[in-house]
Image (spheres, grey):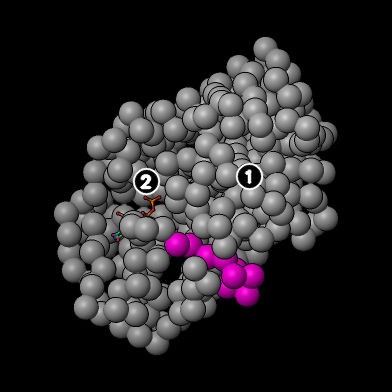
């Protein structure tokens, strides 16, 4: 297949591009390079374009046929979304609508959409499956949920085939392929703690130690980015067989608190992580852990990096010698 990977210069998108290429597909990346890295576009050509610019989107579809689009272009920081909601709705909702309309104009009828556990809000059960109520508590999650709804409506109205993949906490890297997690500024836990470990002058801030969890810090379900990438290949195969709009939760099914992740990182690296208590970060739910039973049953997906130490080891390999 020829696949358009929108946001393919970013963290998850570049790992998906690598895996698609390795499985024999042809990849074209579309990215505005606002947060992505040109160096991470290694498995196909780059079209530098913005999903808010409909003319440049049209140009990206002109004269080429894509069998499907994989869509990773998004603002994706919970805290930032709380203070800049217009930016989130504009990029994540309006931008996606532009992309969907361009796909329709150019007869592309399949999309894999990068969604998030943030569509669920505060969990009402210990494992979150696809039927869990969707009640986002921040604009980031709300913007993704709106797109999920648009995709469901487009399945009915236009026969668009779609799969929403709701990532829990993407983590890890593929250092041997020269790609890993690199945001500036960095806000995510694992890269921040590895940076603190490399530079003890800038200790990690632990956001909130008074959550209703066993050690008071937030619990998250960390899933390796290459396992996420594998799910995208399976989602494409699923759409071949099955019309309609589908959604799957992707996680390992085990939660780790911030303090547990710090402890595991110290074991993996042999270094101390210096950290200090900081206030809660707005918009963070206390616990998010996935049930991925549907992805296992329907897509035949199962994560290969099942332990936090395995995931941290690959992140550490990257952070010791990042390629960009
Ligand atoms: N976190 C933290 N310090 C940091 C970054 C994150 O304590 O420097 C916490 C954050 O509050 C959350 C968890 O680590 O409870 C995971 O946050 P991250 O930003 O990695 O992912 P998110 O869950 O927001 O998608």
- Magenta-tinted stretch: 174-182
**Quadrant occupied by the N terminus:** top right
- Disc 2: residue Cβ within 8 A of ligand 1's nearest atom: yes
Point out residue 41 in the picture as x, y percentages from the top left corner.
Answer: 62, 57
Residue 10, placed above or below residue 86: below
Location of ligand 1 given as a quarter of the image? bottom left
Looking at marks 2 and 1 on the same chain, the residue that comes earlier in the sequence is marked by 1
Q: Position of residue 173 (x, y in %)?
A: 55, 67
Would you say 134 lies left or right of 80 here?
Answer: right
Give the structural element (helix, strand or loop) at label 1.
strand
Q: Is residue 177 within the magenta segment?
A: yes
Q: Position of residue 210 (x, y in %)?
A: 19, 54
Q: In this picture, is 310 found above or below 171?
A: below
Instruction: Please name which of the two marks, 2 or 1, marks the residue nearer to the observer.
Output: 1
Q: Are marks 2 and 1 in contact (CB under 8 Å)?
A: no
Measured from the top left, where is residue 288 in percent x and y? Answer: 41, 48
Quarter of the view holding residue 107: top right
Between the residue at mark 2 and the residue at mark 1, the CA separation in whole angstroms equals 25 Å
- Neighbor class of circle 2 (other Cα within 10 Å; few <14, some 14-19, many 20+) is some
Count of numbered labels shown in the rendering: 2
Does residue 200 show up? yes
Taking depth in this image into account, of 245 and 84 the one nearest to the observer is 84
Q: Secondary structure at mark 2?
A: loop
- Where residue 183 sits, quadrant-wise, is bottom left
Q: Residue at x 17, y 64 (%)?
A: 277
* Residue at image mark 1: 47
């Amino acid at each position: 297949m020829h696949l358009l990977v929108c946001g393919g210069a970013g963290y998850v998108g570049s790992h998906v591009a690598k895996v698609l290429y390795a499985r024999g597909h042809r990849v074209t990346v579309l990215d505005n390079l606002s947060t992505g890295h040109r160096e991470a576009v290694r498995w196909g050509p780059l079209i530098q374009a913005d999903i808010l610019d409909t003319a440049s989107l049209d140009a990206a579809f002109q004269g080429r046929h894509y069998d499907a689009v994989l869509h990773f272009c998004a603002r994706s920081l919970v805290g930032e979304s709380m203070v800049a909601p217009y930016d989130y709705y504009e990029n994540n909702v309006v931008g996606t609508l532009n992309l969907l309309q361009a796909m329709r104009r150019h007869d592309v009828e399949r999309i894999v959409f990068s969604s998030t556990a943030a569509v669920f809000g505060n969990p009402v059960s210990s494992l979150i499956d696809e039927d869990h109520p969707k009640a986002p508590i921040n604009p980031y999650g709300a913007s993704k949920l709106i797109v999920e709804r648009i995709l469901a409506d487009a399945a009915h109205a236009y026969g668009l085939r779609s799969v929403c993949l709701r990532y829990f906490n993407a983590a890890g890297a593929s250092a041997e392929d020269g790609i890993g997690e690199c945001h500036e500024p960095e806000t995510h836990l694992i890269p921040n703690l590895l940076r603190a470990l490399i530079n003890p002058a800038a200790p990690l801030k632990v956001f909130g130690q008074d959550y209703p969890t066993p050690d008071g810090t937030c619990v998250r379900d960390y899933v390796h980015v290459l396992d996420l990438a594998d799910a995208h290949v399976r989602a494409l195969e699923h759409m071949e067989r099955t019309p309609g709009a589908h959604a799957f939760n992707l996680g390992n099914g085990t939660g780790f608190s911030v303090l547990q992740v710090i402890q595991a990182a110290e074991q993996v690296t042999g270094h101390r992580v210096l950290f200090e208590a900081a206030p809660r970060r707005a918009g963070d739910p206390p616990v998010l852990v996935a049930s991925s039973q549907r992805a296992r049953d329907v897509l035949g997906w199962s994560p290969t990096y099942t332990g936090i130490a395995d995931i941290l080891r690959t992140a550490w390999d990257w952070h010791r010698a990042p390629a960009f």
